[in-house]
Image: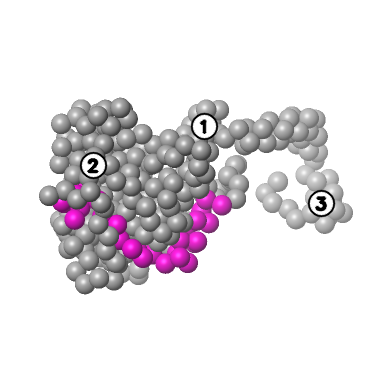
Amino acid sequence: MIYNTIKEFNANETNIAKYAAEEIDKNGVVIIKDFITNKDCEEIKKLLIGNQLRNSNELTFVYIDDAKFFSNAIAQSKTAYNLVTSKIALSISKNYLGNNIRLKCHRAYTTKKNYFFPWHTDNKFDDEKNNKKGIVFIIYLVDTINGATEFILGSHKESHIYKNNLFLEQDINLKYKDRICKAVGKAGYAVISDTRVIHRGSVASGENINRYSFFFQVDANLNQAERLLLNPEFLPKSISNELSEYLGFSSNFGLDVHPVTTNIDKVLPFNVRVNLMFKYLVLTLLTPLHWIRIKIPIKFKILLKKIGNVKSDWN
């Protein structure tokens, strides 16, 4: 039986991992209320606040149009690390996938009205679709109505018949319109789904979208994942074999970290491009001063810095 609504549970319910896994198996998706606290939501949101860093050794988000993605979150945020390794996340994953699981990828992201998620499934490695079993967690970091993820209930049991993992809206409306449900939720809610279920970020014309979410995917396939950057101070002193396998220690990664955004001229928002234009125009005009700075002997640089009380770096 396929419901016409997405079933919801509370995170503190007894046997929540079992109930969640059963519901995902039945309908492809479930909502868990109060998966993380509002304080945790605010901490993870900080990864997406402020300006993108350039020419920096610090980690930063990347742009795709007006969307931001931070795909190295657990190297930067202890809260994000605690989330992807939490007891409840691991318990639900194991109940659904079995004991051998691996974190495939993760990212904090925010999207506005100009970023479009088409109908798709998440069972792919880079651009190649596969039928490996996996589970996706989307945690809303703000109350989310417009922009909430839409799912075709039960589609995880039939999406394998399609060669590609992307779908046209007209095809979806023709075959699955009566099974589309929107996963509306409050900050801290988790929307958990099978990677094979057909879904997309919803779009409401004319309404503002200010969606902040955290996504991570857990797979039963242990052989491939996106490269993982991790702050070692987040790890426990004694690392179990279970945690080592889950994080992919000593295992092959092999997948590109998504989103891959090397073509900055195509993906930066308009206001960022304008700011860059003025910034680099000024830098170009300062080229003669830069040349003089390079040519000045070191002893004069030191003297000038002492006179100006300027803190010195390597150069």
Q: Measuring from the top left, give residue 59's x and y in whole percent.
A: 51, 49
The kind of secondary structure element at disc 2 is: helix
Give the residue at mark 3: 305
Residue displayed at 38% across by 56% down:
185
* Circle on res. 179: 2
Residues in magenta, as a range: 23-49
In the rendered view, tell whether residue 44 sits above or below residue 136: below
| Eye-nearest disc, 1 or 2 | 2
Label 1 neighbour load within 10 Å: few <14, some 14-19, many 20+ = some
Q: Is residue 244 visible?
A: no
Q: Is residue 207 visible?
A: yes
Image quarter for residue 288? top right
Mark closest to the chain's N terminus, 1 or 2 = 2
Give the residue at mark 1: 267
Q: Label 3 is placed on what type of residue?
A: Lys
Q: Is residue 100 magenta?
A: no
Q: CA distance from mark 2 to mark 3?
A: 69 Å
Q: Nearer the viewer, residue 83 or 34?
A: 34
Mark closest to the chain's N terminus, 1 or 3 = 1
The kind of secondary structure element at disc 1 is: helix
| Eye-nearest disc, 2 or 3 | 2
